[in-house]
Image (cartoon, coloured by chain):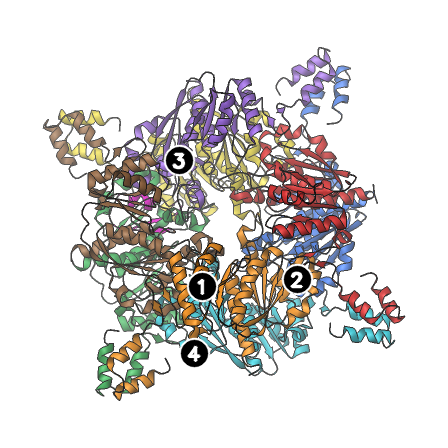
Chain colours: A blue, B orange, C cyan, D brown, E green, F purple, G yellow, H red
Amino acid sequence: MKDLHEMLLKVRQGEISLAEAESYLRRKPFEDMGYAKVDTHRRVRSGFPEVIFAQGKADEHLLAIFQRIFEDEGEVMATRASEQQYELIAARLPEARYDKLSRIITCVRSARQKQGCIAVCTAGTADIPVAEEAAQVAEYFGNYVERIYDVGVSGIHRLLSRLDIIQKANCVIAVAGMEGALGSVIAGLVDKPVIAVPTSIGYGANFHGVSALLTMINSCANGIATVNIDNGYGAGYIAAQINRLAAAEA
Amino acid sequence: MKDLHEMLLKVRQGEISLAEAESYLRRKPFEDMGYAKVDTHRRVRSGFPEVIFAQGKADEHLLAIFQRIFEDEGEVMATRASEQQYELIAARLPEARYDKLSRIITCVRSARQKQGCIAVCTAGTADIPVAEEAAQVAEYFGNYVERIYDVGVSGIHRLLSRLDIIQKANCVIAVAGMEGALGSVIAGLVDKPVIAVPTSIGYGANFHGVSALLTMINSCANGIATVNIDNGYGAGYIAAQINRLAAAEA
Amino acid sequence: MKDLHEMLLKVRQGEISLAEAESYLRRKPFEDMGYAKVDTHRRVRSGFPEVIFAQGKADEHLLAIFQRIFEDEGEVMATRASEQQYELIAARLPEARYDKLSRIITCVRSARQKQGCIAVCTAGTADIPVAEEAAQVAEYFGNYVERIYDVGVSGIHRLLSRLDIIQKANCVIAVAGMEGALGSVIAGLVDKPVIAVPTSIGYGANFHGVSALLTMINSCANGIATVNIDNGYGAGYIAAQINRLAAAEA
Amino acid sequence: MKDLHEMLLKVRQGEISLAEAESYLRRKPFEDMGYAKVDTHRRVRSGFPEVIFAQGKADEHLLAIFQRIFEDEGEVMATRASEQQYELIAARLPEARYDKLSRIITCVRSARQKQGCIAVCTAGTADIPVAEEAAQVAEYFGNYVERIYDVGVSGIHRLLSRLDIIQKANCVIAVAGMEGALGSVIAGLVDKPVIAVPTSIGYGANFHGVSALLTMINSCANGIATVNIDNGYGAGYIAAQINRLAAAEA
Amino acid sequence: MKDLHEMLLKVRQGEISLAEAESYLRRKPFEDMGYAKVDTHRRVRSGFPEVIFAQGKADEHLLAIFQRIFEDEGEVMATRASEQQYELIAARLPEARYDKLSRIITCVRSARQKQGCIAVCTAGTADIPVAEEAAQVAEYFGNYVERIYDVGVSGIHRLLSRLDIIQKANCVIAVAGMEGALGSVIAGLVDKPVIAVPTSIGYGANFHGVSALLTMINSCANGIATVNIDNGYGAGYIAAQINRLAAAEA
Amino acid sequence: MKDLHEMLLKVRQGEISLAEAESYLRRKPFEDMGYAKVDTHRRVRSGFPEVIFAQGKADEHLLAIFQRIFEDEGEVMATRASEQQYELIAARLPEARYDKLSRIITCVRSARQKQGCIAVCTAGTADIPVAEEAAQVAEYFGNYVERIYDVGVSGIHRLLSRLDIIQKANCVIAVAGMEGALGSVIAGLVDKPVIAVPTSIGYGANFHGVSALLTMINSCANGIATVNIDNGYGAGYIAAQINRLAAAEA
Amino acid sequence: MKDLHEMLLKVRQGEISLAEAESYLRRKPFEDMGYAKVDTHRRVRSGFPEVIFAQGKADEHLLAIFQRIFEDEGEVMATRASEQQYELIAARLPEARYDKLSRIITCVRSARQKQGCIAVCTAGTADIPVAEEAAQVAEYFGNYVERIYDVGVSGIHRLLSRLDIIQKANCVIAVAGMEGALGSVIAGLVDKPVIAVPTSIGYGANFHGVSALLTMINSCANGIATVNIDNGYGAGYIAAQINRLAAAEA
Amino acid sequence: MKDLHEMLLKVRQGEISLAEAESYLRRKPFEDMGYAKVDTHRRVRSGFPEVIFAQGKADEHLLAIFQRIFEDEGEVMATRASEQQYELIAARLPEARYDKLSRIITCVRSARQKQGCIAVCTAGTADIPVAEEAAQVAEYFGNYVERIYDVGVSGIHRLLSRLDIIQKANCVIAVAGMEGALGSVIAGLVDKPVIAVPTSIGYGANFHGVSALLTMINSCANGIATVNIDNGYGAGYIAAQINRLAAAEA
């Protein structure tokens, strides 16, 4: 919006036509593909490339969007992708790679340099897929990531033995299911923001992750905020924003 | 029921009348006060004297039951009692004592000797009233109690500094509101049963203690079981049963 | 931590190097297998061998952990195991045994001697799988178990007819779905701790066991605590701790 | 509607005017008092007089409706009435009576003869107000009522000692809060319909009676149906219908 | 228990041995099949034969229990049975019959005579399977049943056109999913007990029948009580008890 | 936005300055009072004057906003107002009027002419305050309103007797608490949009209106949409929009 | 009912027989097909033809109802239809058409003329199937529909760029899952009724659409009402009623 | 822990005694006041002074802790404080200040210099108290804060007009009740982390803020995380951590 004055000046001076000005004021900063509006300005606006949520997308739509972004940007990532979706894409783009654990497809011309540090911790081994989604999204956005897995609170010595690594990060992602207490314990031990990710791991009265979500939202610790159940992507995204703030001026 | 054979033998031998036998077989092991059935056999059956839940009782009922048990047993306790209820009782039984924090009235001729050890831990200072209900019930039943308060998981070093005392107990009561993670952490550090008590302390999405209850029920640790929200009495009772089992033969 | 003094003394006397002391103070009492941290100190700490939660584990991880513990300990148990997981293990360890009902795999060189007594009761026949998980875990840990099945409260005479056996146990596990009232009734009839296990048996407004869980948490009886829905393992574990306390000195 | 033919015949024969016929077909079987539509046909339709739900009614409305029904019917009952509401009515109708426990106001010229038998049971003493609402409504409708109070399942012998009385009733009302297991146990012991009334008595995870409601709805017993939390009136009403069916032909 | 006096008299007179008396006092009014306790006294106690809940039963258990009851009683019914379970039984008992809609297997030597009247109404066609479970259970117990299907409240004229039939029944079963309003409307139109059955029919915020359950529990009408979601059996059972009370003396 | 072209033309022609154009493009169509942004364009945009939600507003804020709108518009309405708030306003604007039932304050120079027809129905008398909020808001916006109160589904004849009036309206507002079935029945009887308003009237498992809300959202009828619990204002607003559409061209 | 007077007049004048009159007064405005009551008067009463909810219907019932309505009306629509159900119908009615996205089968002799305008907006591409159900139902009923898809609030410029089209509609349908904020934003931008449709799109704490439903019900905007989760049909229906009101007189 | 090596070296060299070393290794980094453990190392560990949660604290405890921290730190803040609590403190510390809106008491010798920028936005005026808690906590910790209030999504132009200010902040706090959509819209417009705070503002189905919480947790936007309902303090804390990261190196 900052060039509003400039544009109006040009209108006055006749440098651009009325039609151009109207078009400028009404322009849609996205490309309409009919079934979807691909946000081609996102990288400019947010500094991060767009990431595709693959789950539930029709095959032809996924393929078209994936290719389109890769052509435009030279890099593309799809989360929540099935193996079958990967094969579909790999048939066209053989350089695409698939990580089964995190269910992420990537296709990258040249990897970004990693900066700063984000620590990704899990309570148990079953939480690793969600943690990997967070870690790989953060890495894709150019952040350095430390993984500290299986350090749940029922054996607190495992967490304490890795504390020095965790304390060095600019932002900590705490991934936990069942009772979800990991976030509170870590937030009490570090002085950086903790992003808590509840997972749907557990059974019985865990209600597919609601128990862990409530634990994290009700945390008695300072410096903790929460994203949706199993939302590794969301945690990786906001952690990347925070780490970028810290690293930008360094 | 073990003397059934004996009793029938006496019937056969004419040592007891038919009426006596029928009465024996039909006898009600409680006293009917009309509005309530006071369980005069409880001490025999359970080894613990009956405790009165004062909240919501009509004044005349509370007073009558309280006096009756004191006369029969020489000791009596009422939980969830208001100050006004205490004054009502104290007018008749000046030796009655009231603890404002735990809201417990007691009247005891001679205190029992304490045996074994139960550790009562709280996450914060606001959980102390519930913890005191548990601790004082356990003490009333003749158990030695260690209090370790304000050792919540957001500052884990406070808990670790007291670990040696906690590990010596036969049973640990973990009292916590907000996210309720204390029980999991303690259960991972001791090899004795942990009774978790969620409290209604907190706000927002804690739902008056449901968040802490879910955390405790979903605990990833071994050796933990849970009682109702704010149910200090229930925790003290089962902990007393466990400590008695451990101490009985020592 | 009790040898802290001793270790520092050796440092002073030059008997151990600084590096050794540091390593000692920082040592991790678990073995890091990369994807998991096997708790090799658990038997020492808790007196019970580690039990594997098989559900959701990757085949190669399950197999490696199972073998590793068996080699170290001469005994191993996996709960929530599928028949396919059993076959995987049996191909390597032909002496492994599988119980379809409780879905438990065991591999034991020499069974422990059983001590004390735990009673495991169910309301209906559909609750038996959860009860068997509890019973077999308790037996694996060296406890004597009495099974009293199908004694739900809608036919109270069935329960009363077995009361003498239940009253002899040091701890009672009450397993029930639907309305889950069994725990309250038993706790009113015995003077030992009752561990209540809600099951997901039922339909409609039972919400996969939440109804039974609420019933048990709200029990009007004394001496009852609750574990998660279908958590037979957790009930068996804490019952084993309680029975051990009772039996230890006998 | 059975006299439809007759009425049409009269129209044909000119015995009644068109206007009368239209009015007949459109007539409203209630009296419109502006702010309320008093159902003057209810006694005819249902056999029971209308009962006023006093709670929340404006003073002038309550008074007018109360007086109106008393004039028409010679008997009237208001439930959920406050003491202040009673005083308002007593100022006009000194013969009105108020029962503090059940919060019911009645004004009856000549009491009905009681027939049949309804048993009203409670788990604890705190459930008595709801039970009394049920009992007094049933008595007002002309049913004989047996009260069996404080027979909760945590002391099952209290219930068993009164079983013969309960088994004689045509319908049993089981009133219970906390875990609400009373209904299941009674339904397993009698062969008549059991109407279960959950009460809001309890605390913590009882959710103001929802726990007891779920217990009753999920009952594993046969011959049990449930009304709303604290709805003594509703239980008394349907029990009266059932007892009437049983007693009608005797 | 009424022959207690008589039995004791015989003991006194030496007419029965001590062993016989003990056995009498301890006798279990059910047969223990190991995995289940078949209630062989139920018909005597309740007047209705036992009905098997087939769902989730192991094949060999179902078959054994089904055959055993048929041999003892000459009639047997299993609800919630799959077609595969029927084929299992039909291989042994070719006279067994299966109703796909209600998923009921029956095997009856000679049908009972039907008495009285129960009306079974549904809101939509999708509610019919639950209604048929209720209707066929009631018929099996010897009750005459009227079926009035697809009379939901969004087209109230359909219900009004069948009102005369509904009003003749001794008890009405109202089966409805979605918003579940049928029960309230019917209870306002008849003077007999209405048993409301919520069904899990619907989608979105119906929560598998909870919406209909809440509607029925909160009904503003008189003379209505509710059973669990989809619990046609439970509704048929209590309706049969009520109709029997009405018909017994006629 | 339609005069964008025109404005740009003037810029080109130098008829308005750059500053004016920028101001135009950036202008805030509301007035910033610091603590609130009064929407002075609302009447232009929506055709309805702004209505103040009084509840929770600070006294000085309420008074200032109320006066400001009255000065600008010559009419003003505040909903959810307490008597004390009314007195505050009446001290300054003696012509303000307060309706206790609906808790609405109005101050109107000249009432609008009423057009079209909206029918407002309630299930019981306790639902009237919410209904009046809807009705008076609709009247304030210039709509003719028919009130049909106390026509709940447990006495369906009361509703049927008023059907002709209801069927004439362009839009029907159905206000009901408890089980909330009124909306479904009306929507089955009219061919115009029904706006359903659940109320918090009821007790027990009504959850302060959630039961009625779920009933309405799950309605099996066509042509029904729902607003928030007790949201009479919201129902009146959308009904006014609908009636305006119908009446506009008439 | 308006011809009641007329009919009674004819009875008086002997123009129609008593039997005819009775039949008229008792006639059922629907056709009883045994398993269903097809509402043959619906088109007359509501102005819209009946639409079949195909999901869960037995094959023979679906086919019979579909054919019957097509014969009577010359047009028919079935929603929530599977491809297999379409093939079943197409075998008999080759002119039937199936839309995979919305899962709608139609068979129409001559399409209606479209009038007025309804705008259907979605937040994301995954919400399109529900939106199409709404759009096609509205078109089937003769309304002109504008589709504006993928304009969710996380990229508000996409919505603003299409605002002029949305503002021209008589009614806007806002379809959104996840956090469901689209309805509020649109209602703040238009002066026509907004019908909000929550969808089950999302994961974690969205609870299959409950999160979006709550967002919409709690909307801070004016002029918005909500239908059930994924209920495109319901939104299309009421929007058609509203658009018809607006267009009728134009 | 970094001086571990150094300390051990001193032990070796005899520079510190064994007792000192043991004490060092076991030292408790907090001061035990009996009823509370004041965390005197917090400022060192976290860089922020401790803030007191006043609500529910006993008067003498609050006063003692408040004074103690002020003496140690020269600054102190208490949140959720009542006016009565302020008066208590002001009697001792006349320089203490109270902000009624945010319910915060502060006592500060010399205010910190403000750095960076945090934007605090609210949807409505009723959300301001929570926003002020966040803003003042952030300011107390030395952050520059921009307040942008009353910019809810139902009038999106209000938000857009302030966008330039919001976009300049390092972190945005979005405070909203009712449907809580503000966070999603802002996160779509900025490229910095958004901390969403649901408030309990609203009524009906907002469930005291749960609706807004779910909206925020389910947000379709990138770069958003959520804290507990009404938890302004928690949002201010984590925003301060983020802003510090951004500002530290600038």
B2 sits left or right of D74 in the view: right
Mark nearest the camera among 1 and 4 is: 1
Residue D77 rendering spot, x and y as whole percentages: 27, 45
Gap between marks 4 and 3 measured at Cα: 59 Å
In magenta stretch: residue D154: no
Mark nearest the camera among 1 and 3 is: 1
* Residue at the disc numbered 3: F175
Gap between marks 1 and 4 measured at Cα: 43 Å
* Residue at the disc numbered 1: B93
Secondary element at image label 4: helix
> For the residue marked with disc 4, what is the amino acid?
Ile
Gap between marks 3 and 2 measured at Cα: 51 Å
- Is there CB contact under 8 Å for labels 3 and 2? no
Secondary element at image label 3: strand
> For the residue marked with disc 1, what is the amino acid?
Leu
Count of numbered circles in the view:
4
Residue F225 rendering spot, x and y as whole percentages: 44, 35
Dot 3 crowding, Cα within 10 Å, few <14, some 14–19, many 20+ = many
Q: Are marks 1 and 4 on the same chain?
A: no
Give the residues in magenta: E173-199
* Residue at the disc numbered 4: C165
Q: Label for residue E38?
A: none
Q: Are marks 4 and 3 on the same chain?
A: no
The residue most toward the right is H13
In this rendered view, identify the residue nearer to me: D101 or E216. Answer: D101
Residue visible at 16% across and 56% down in the picture: D249
Residue E57 visible in the picture? no
> For the residue marked with disc 2, what is the amino acid?
Val
Q: Label for residue A153?
A: 2
Secondary element at image label 2: helix
